[in-house]
Image: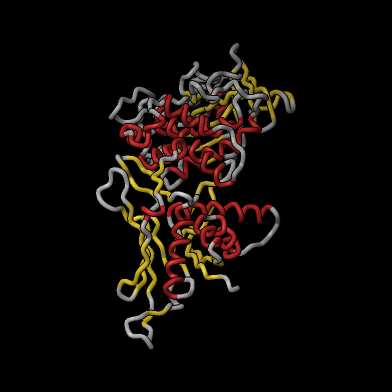
Amino acid sequence: MRELIPGALWSGTELQVTEMVAKARESGISASATKDPQGGRWRVKVGDKELVVEERVSPPGTPKVPPSAGHAGDEHTAPPATHEGAAAPVPHSSFVGNKGTKALTLEDVPSHLHGACALLNGAHTQKNGPALGPSTTGAPFFNAHGPTDVQITTGNKRVRVHIEMMPATEDVARHNFKDPNRSTATIWVSEKARPADVTRALAHELAEIQSIAAGAPASGGAPGAGLDAHQYGRKAEVHTLLFEIDQATRTAAPKTDQGGELKALVTHMGFEPNTIGSNVEAKRILGADEVARIDEALNKPRIVLKPTVAHPKGKMVGSSWMFTIDVNVPGGKGPVPVVEGIIPMKPDPTHPGKFLVDETQTLDFTIEKTTEVNGRKMRIEVEGHKQLTDYVMKEAISQFEAEFHEKPVMGGLLVWDNKAAFQHAYAEIEQVAIQGGKKLTKEQIADQAILKTKYGEARGKQGYHVTTTVSGNTEIVTGDPPRLAIVPERVEALARPKVK
């Protein structure tokens, strides 16, 4: 490359232009190059700088620019045709690329791009999830390189993806990746897309590109057959909407109508929202766990029991006190165990055959809040109680206290909903502390986080002080925009009666 006019005009070959763009991107700097349709010149953008390169012919024997050497050598320097490789509009929804109230720029993209990468990376271990895996390179599946570039990994392949803006279209985003043997791609985002849709659209495009690189057909997936790339893209949209719905519920933050968006999307995918919970094809395409989450978000399927039907029983079994709730559910074969609690006791030395509270033991519960009825997961509730946990705590403590004249110490490992709620709360509290310049220990964060779970709330209502012991680390996706956060893997709680 030779500078002809300082800071304005350069001279170089096509190979030198593509190498410059590639090197800039490898350094995490946004870069692109577009050839003048009339020929002879390239318009190159590196970071915030723009320059013009006057093309000179390569010397004889110089290697030709391989199609994958950089985005300057891609087949398209403009977005492909409408709906081709697209996060296309969804009927009866607001997911359309021209509904934004103001024009977006590339500066608006990074938080959405990093959020989409976090969501897809977090989903790669999910059975039948939107991201493929595992990677044989050890690299993250979707690794953001700078503000507008991502490296996608699948198997032993890597695809470098660059993000650009395009004039307002119906499609929220489009990409140009068709050939699984290529190593570069471009995603264009509509400049009039709603900000609320950008993370979802980018997740669609990234998942679609990854699936094509892995050998999925671009479209045409038939019932019972392998999924096509567009289906992987729509799965990524579903995953994004479910995360946003859960996040809004956790934080009580106002959000666009993601429930309505989810309903429109699954309808567009050919599923009836009201019966999706038992739809076999939906479970094949989206995964059983994801379908259960959709059903919960849209329909909230419930089995509501009357307190007189729950039959909570606390009694001594051997040398332990046990508390159980077994219920009959529609379509079930016999009683279903919903709650089981147990605490070892110690013999009463003055009354043979009787038992006393052992201060070293805790009452540990297993509460199964869901059961399957006709292929559909349904939550169990007790009439008059907002949460099943509230009812269980009230009944168990009442019966234990009536028999032994004191409240039990309660403990146990957090699992399922409570563990997830704890981990998200932990990540949020830690981030707020860091942003506020506060130094909190792991234990301090954990003791605050437990109070934001149903586990902590239910025991707090019954006059308990709850503390935790945490160990190990794991990674979750949390926040708005989504991000990966390291949180405790094992959470053990201890609830002691407050001293009056």
Q: Is residue 437 above or below residue 280?
A: below
Is residue 23 shown left or right of residue 276?
right
Q: How many labels does the image show?
A: 0
Residue at 73 percent across and 28 percent down: it is 7
Specify whether residue 23 is in view: no
Q: Where is residue 96 in the image (x, y as percent from the top left)?
A: 55, 22
Q: Residue at x 34, y 72 (%)?
A: 316
Within the image, what quadrant is residue 195 found in? top right
Q: Where is residue 197 in the image (x, y as percent from the top left)?
A: 56, 30
Seen as rendered, the residue at the extreme left is 333
Q: Dividing the picture into quarters, in which one does residue 483 lie?
A: top right
Which of these two is toward me, 382 or 195?
Answer: 382
Q: Quadrant of residue 283?
A: top left
Percent of width and height locating residue 39:
59, 14
Furthest toward the top, the residue is 38
The outermost residue toward the bottom is 350
Residue reaching furthest to the right = 6
Whether residue 204 is situated above or below residue 300 in the rendered picture: above
**Rendering coords of residue 397 (x, y %):** 46, 66
Out of 490 and 260, give the one closest to the viewer.
260
Q: In which quarter of the image is the C terminus?
A: bottom right
Please say if 247 is above or below 35.
below
Residue in view at x 38 percent, y 54 percent? 308
- Residue, x 55% and y 44% (percent of image)? 249
